[in-house]
Image (spheres, rainbow, N blue to C red):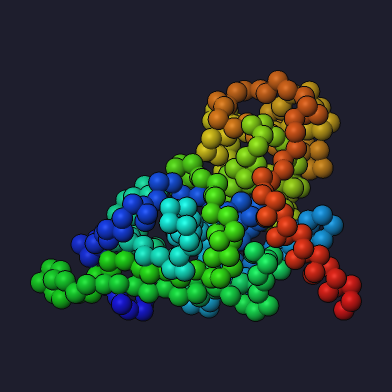
Amino acid sequence: MAALDGVEHYEVGQLDLDLGDSGRVAGIGNKPLLMVFKFFALATTEQSLVTRAPWDGVSVELRCEPNPKYGLATQFDKHFFMFVISKMAHIKRTCGSTPRKVDVTIGEYLRATNTTSTGYAYDQVRLSIQRLQSMRIYTNIEMNGRGVDEWFSWFQRASMHYETRNVGGKERRCMTSFTIEPCDWIVAALEEDAELLTYAPEYFQLKSAFVQRVYEVARVESEQEIFKISLERLMLQTGFGHDAKAFRKNFRRQVVNSSGTGQTNVPEHAVYAFTAAAPETSVDWSQRVKAEDQWYVFVRNAPQQAVLEKHLDDIPEWEPSLSDYEMRTITPSAEKLKEAVMTS
């Protein structure tokens, strides 16, 4: 076992562990609460991450500070994070108890995300673990009654296992697996409810962190097959910022193809632009629409059409599919924050 720095990493050094049926993950999923809000940076260049979102009249807060050497954990690092909690959730459902730590081989992770096994992929796994362990997080959200009044990391501890092997005539230490111990905050969530929302396999092939966040916001609405969300709300939930013009430009460029027709880049969803000023049908993506009138309509598991012949008023609004437990998790802790602000 070794620290993560200063270790050679070659494909030849990866060895799968036989963890039994309880350790194998059929699909990668996530806790809905971790999909509703922006918990991960869209790019490593972000110097800090602060998410504040209104919730029933109070504010949910998340603050992340990067490690100066590695930076903030990003949407792409989240892939490995989700694989870890998916494996823990699978063990919980199979064995009845939530493991405090889990062994993960690089090979099983790359296969699960349909990622080609290369030296670059190995580098990215190691960097993801380093960022997930080294960044510091504060949030007023509680999990299973547990809050944290100090900074914590997604991974409390991460250890690398290696073997010394002969590679090209030289003795080298080669990675074989990792032992990951997530933070208590995540363990508490899995202890309460090990059910996850699974992601489309195509999600892990998306090259855009922005499109990944759009998919997560759409996926967490799991009750309605068709729903609408305003420009303002979609900006808030994706954590993009407050520049509506830049958001719409990115949406058109990254979610919709250049011609504005054909299937969008959001897996399992057709997407349409609507305006409250003319709500009878969808409008062309090139049409100028006031930011306050802009709506997006998502249709799950349906082919993209040139026009959606449906009145905007007849389409239900986006509502995240959170469990009663998750609703209780947010509301009491947010209320505590509100009380603290009022008495300060």
Q: Is residue 103 above or below residue 267?
A: below
Residue 99 percent location from the top left of the image: 45, 65
Say left or right for 89 vs 318: left
The quarter of the picture where the C terminus appears is: bottom right
Residue 110 percent location from the top left of the image: 35, 53
Determine the image quadrant of residue 326: bottom right
Which residue is rendered at x = 49% and y = 62% of the image? 98
The quarter of the picture where the N terminus appears is: bottom left
Which residue is rendered at x = 74% and y = 62% of the image? 60
Residue 26 percent location from the top left of the image: 40, 46
Which residue is rendered at x = 54% and y = 50% of the image? 195
Residue 302 percent location from the top left of the image: 57, 27
Outermost residue toward the top in this view:
309
Q: Is residue 2 visible?
A: yes
Determine the image quadrant of residue 169: bottom left
Residue situated in front as seen by the camera: 115 or 47: 115
Which residue is rendered at x = 45% and y = 75% of the image? 157
Q: Is residue 304 above or below residue 232?
A: above
